[in-house]
Amino acid sequence: MIHQNLHLIDFARDSAHYILDRARAAIADRGMFRLSLAGGNTPREIYAALADVGRDLPWNKVQITFSDERCVAPHDKDSNFRMAQESLLTVAPIPGGNVFRIRGEIDPGVAAAEYEAKLAAVAARLGETRYVHDLLLLGLGPDGHTASLFPGSPALYEEERNVIPTIGPKPPPQRITFTFPLINAAREVAFLVKEDSKKKVIEEVQIGDPRHPASKVKPATWLLGF
């Protein structure tokens, strides 16, 4: 597996410029930039920087999805949507209809099926077997998990579904997550990691260590803040 490691001096702004470059290229080539946002705490500063450095981006041509969501209301402190909304979605002029929110406040099975159907409808219009993201952002947990794909979870072996409900080991446990078939359908995947304490896990993921779910992601770019 071949991975690209980028050790960034200014993690937030350099990551934002990386995303912005891909956005401009996708819009020039295909008329649209389909971006999947990672959750957790690490991306917040990146999204804020993206809203700042991307002021001239035609945001009406950007389509936003979420690789996972906690099963909470959108205003809850644990909501990935809330974090993205505060840092990016209410700052950059993205049309509301371009933001595909996972409804974490409803039954997880219903929410997953609803989100899967939304992505499938777009993919069908574009002649795709699966929805194809131009750039899919992911985080990395200390246990090697990514999105809400945790070690030992049956979700790791899903081969047909694109979006499924799952259970995580830490609260809030109920989650909705992209599966590996959908993640690996992306044109490009980028991991966002700021903590140098994860260096060993990153190295193990990159050599395909099966203990770490992130090892199942196709070769990716690693945006590293250390």
Image: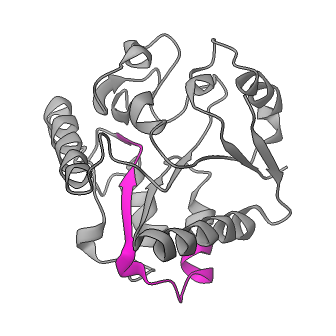
**Residue 209 locus on image (x, y percent):** 70, 15
Does residue 122 appear left or right of residue 148 in this picture? left
Which quarter of the figure has residue 215?
A: top right
Which of the 4 image quarters holds residue 5?
top right
Q: Nearer the viewer, residue 176 or 173?
A: 176
One can see residue 3 in this view: yes
* Residue at 62% in and 36% down: 140
Q: In the displayed structure, would residue 219 be above or below residue 16?
A: above
Q: Is residue 221 magenta?
A: no
Q: Position of residue 187 (x, y in %)?
A: 52, 49
Which residue occupies 80% across, 66% down?
10
Q: Quadrant of the N terminus?
A: top right
Q: Is residue 78 left or right of residue 6?
A: left
Residue 105 visible? The answer is no
Q: Which residues are magenta?
A: 49-69
For residue 15, above or below residue 184: below
Residue at 49 percent of width and 71 percent of height = 29
Relative height, residue 224 to residue 153 (above, below): below
**Residue 47 at x, y percent in the picture:** 55, 66
Observer-nearest residue: 57 or 71? 57
